[in-house]
Image (spheres, rainbow, N blue to C red):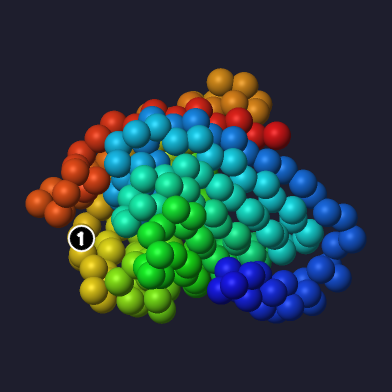
Amino acid sequence: MKVLAVAAIAVSIAAPALAQDNEWKISSEITATTDYISKGISKTNGDPALQAGWTAARGDFYVTPWISNADFGPGADAEVKLTTGWAPEAWGYEWDWALIGKAFPGTVAGVDDTMVEFQGAVKRSIGPADLRFLVNYTPDNYGASEQAWWTEATGGWKFSPKTRASGAVGYREQDGGTDYWAWNLGVNYKLTDKLAADVRYYDTNGHEFGDVYDARVVGALKLRL
């Protein structure tokens, strides 16, 4: 119910933006990855994941439902996400303001299995270089955790039209949960116009908190349609 409420609120807020453009643009993305990493840690306990998302965009407004298998927390075996956002370009920057509703099917009864996130990001590209800063906040995190923040800075360099290297550093702070730093470094290569491969090294400073915080190399194939 909480996720549906978020979607309804987001659509009502974004309704004025729909008047900017009468044309809906539809796209989708399917990802096969050796591990599902979110906010620096594994959400599949080191196992592979298959993910699918679908986006409907109109002007600067977009809606994206997304799903992935998962294996974390008390029983969660999937993650379902609905994002509604507004992504304009202004003053030479790319902005992205989003409202995200998440649900985790399979979670044992009695454990809070839904959450809402508020996210803002800004990106600037200069020649082959780009820099992005993101802040994500939830007032009531999954399970026993309450409010939580994720702050991340990402930098990238495009070596060619097909090859881009990037790295990121992020910090997780949460009430009733674990605080930690996370970082990654990798290369994305376009195999075709629609298919790309990504190989990335992930690590955190929280190895003592469990295997999901350990260093790992992750490979992924992304198909965009």
Of residues 55 and 65, the one drawn nearer to the viewer in this rendering: 65
Residue 95 rendering spot, x and y as whole percentages: 57, 64
The amino acid type, in three-letter code, at marker 1 is: Tyr
Q: Could one spot residue 83 in this view of the protein?
A: yes
Residue at 20 percent across and 60 percent down: it is 180
Quadrant in the rendering for residue 17: bottom right
> Is residue 175 shown above or below 81?
below
Residue 134 horizontal side relative to residue 193, left or right: left
SS at circle 1 = strand
Badge 1: few (under 14), some or many (20 or more) residues near its Cα, within 10 Å?
Answer: some
The percent coordinates of residue 191 (x first, y second) are: 56, 21
Residue in the image at 49% along x and 31% along y:
32
Q: Residue at x 21, y 64 (%)?
A: 178
Considering every residue shown, the one lying at the far front of the view is: 109
* Along the viewing direction, whichever of 81 and 179 lies nearer the viewer: 81
- Quadrant housing the C terminus: top right
Which residue matches tag 1? 180
Residue 132 in view in this figure: no
Taking the image as shown, residue 138 lies to the left or right of residue 222, namely: left
Residue 70: quarter of image: top left
Judged from this view, the residue extending furthest toward the top is 191
Task: Give the quadrant of the N terminus.
Answer: bottom right
Residue 75 location, x and y as percent? 36, 52
Residue closest to the eye, 159 or 134: 134
Please state the horizontal and vertical placement of residue 64, each as a whole percent of the image: 65, 55
The single residue placed furthest to the left in the displayed view is: 208
